[in-house]
Image (spheres, coloured by chain):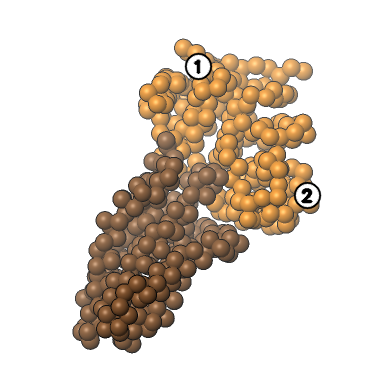
Chain colours: A brown, B orange
Amino acid sequence: MLKAYYHLLLRDLRLALRNRHELANPLIFFVLVVTLFPLAVTPTPEALRMMAPGVIWVSALLAVLLSLDRLFKTDYDDGSLDQLMLSPNPLMILVLAKVSAHWLLTGLPLVIIAPLLGLFMSLPMEAVSVLIYSLLLGTPVLSLVGAIGVSLTVAVNRGGVLLSLIILPLYIPILIFGANAVDVASDGLPVTGQLLFLGAVLALALSLAPLATSVALRITASR
Amino acid sequence: MSPAPKITPMFEIQSLECVRDDRLLFSDLSFSVAESEVLQIEGSNGSGKTSLLRILCGLRQAEAGQVLWRGELITSNREDYYANMVYIGHLPCIKGDLTVMENVRSLLDTRSLSLSNAEIEVALTKVGLATYDDVPGKALSSGQRRRILLAFVELSQAKLWVLDEPLTALDVQGVALMESMILEHREAGGSVIFTTHHGMQLDCEMSSVRLGQKTSTKTVTKAAV
């Protein structure tokens, strides 16, 4: 079972590395939005510091949203998804492998580049570290919850709008707590509560989202 | 086929019904498949052959009826059934960015089979892809992609093969290869359920089920010697 997880994770990473331009898309989007923002508003350090948590979190969320489509799309189009569903291994484990690969390829790069953008938006040092923690806890949830939406819409042509409608409401709590944690930290206040909430949501998503995704995939395949 | 009470057939379906877009494709369809049995599903375009095969593998939900593997519902016996059943459909399942070897390997990985490179190469040689190990999937013709799937089926160690139009895109040698593979599989005690619009000349006893009539009956034809 662990082997099946590991093999599928490896396959997805290998496929992504052979298709690098797609890999860079969400990261470029993230960096572009955050760097363009100060050009469009008054770039005083105070104003930037005030906006930074929101801008960075919203861009990260949208970058993940844009990349979700490819999570199951190619596998669905070429029939590999059928083979995954016919595996003797639990589909949940395979879903978890695909979501892990997705996070390693989109979420993790965002977490790595975020501190740089935080400094660029003149966030204080302690807020930057909270930004890393909040993204580290929040982006896996975005991938996990997104997978549920993708599995429901993968069979729909141009399901992008539908996908956003389904999962954006579920993303909003993550956005509020994530951005709020960074905001509060830049005022020098404790943020344990917000981070604990994000951690709890991650634990919840990690245990329930793969199950929901695999059920949704079976529904999609039965059409 | 004469009913065989007391003996549980390897694979059995009971009064299946399938509706697609408000159209009844078939209903009350029952048959069983024993070991070493080759069963062809016949029927015109749109008669529900693909839907039936997808129901047989549990990918699709039937409106009514049940699919049994060794006497147990496949939904409650998934692990055992899927370890013993292999399905290939219309879609190629081939990744253009992976090499032939990696493609076969990733297909086998979903079945948790770890075979040596040598074993995979034997199968690739058999399907006529001997020198293609390192060629990426996107450089292959559609017939060659189908041949990768044949190698996968060969290596799958499954007792039951469910093949949806396996001859699509295959050339004359490919068709002959498929036929010999089915015969070999049958000799080894395996079973095959397949659909095809091409003539498949199988030199063995073969049964068939015809869809699209009021009653779908199973007939057995002896091999033409």
> In the rendered structure, which disc, 2 or 1, sits on the residue that comes first in sequence?
2
Check the picture and name the quadrant holding the C terminus of chain B.
Answer: top right
The residue sitting at the top extreme is B214
Residue at left offset 37%, top offset 26%: B64
Which numbered tag is attached to residue B21? none
Residue B217: x %, y % from top left: 52, 15
Q: Position of residue B75 (x, y in %)?
A: 41, 39
Left or right relative to B41: residue B188: right
State the residue at coordinates (37%, 75%): A39
- For the image, the number of numbered tags is 2
| Mark 2 to mark 1 CA distance (whole Å) | 41 Å
Amino acid on which disc 2 is placed: Ala
Q: Position of residue A194 (x, y in %)?
A: 23, 74
Labels 2 and 1 positioned on one and the same chain: yes
Judge left or right: residue B153 versus residue B25: right
**Mark 1 neighbour class, 10 Å CA radius: few under 14, some 14 to 19, many 20 or more:** some
Q: Chain of mark 1?
A: B
Query: Looking at the picture, how far across and down is residue B154, in whole percent?
Result: 67, 42
The residue at which mark 1 appears reads as B212
B128 or B13, which lies in front? B128
**Residue type at numbered disc 1:** Gly
Residue to which mark 2 is pinned: B130
Which chain letter matches label 2?
B
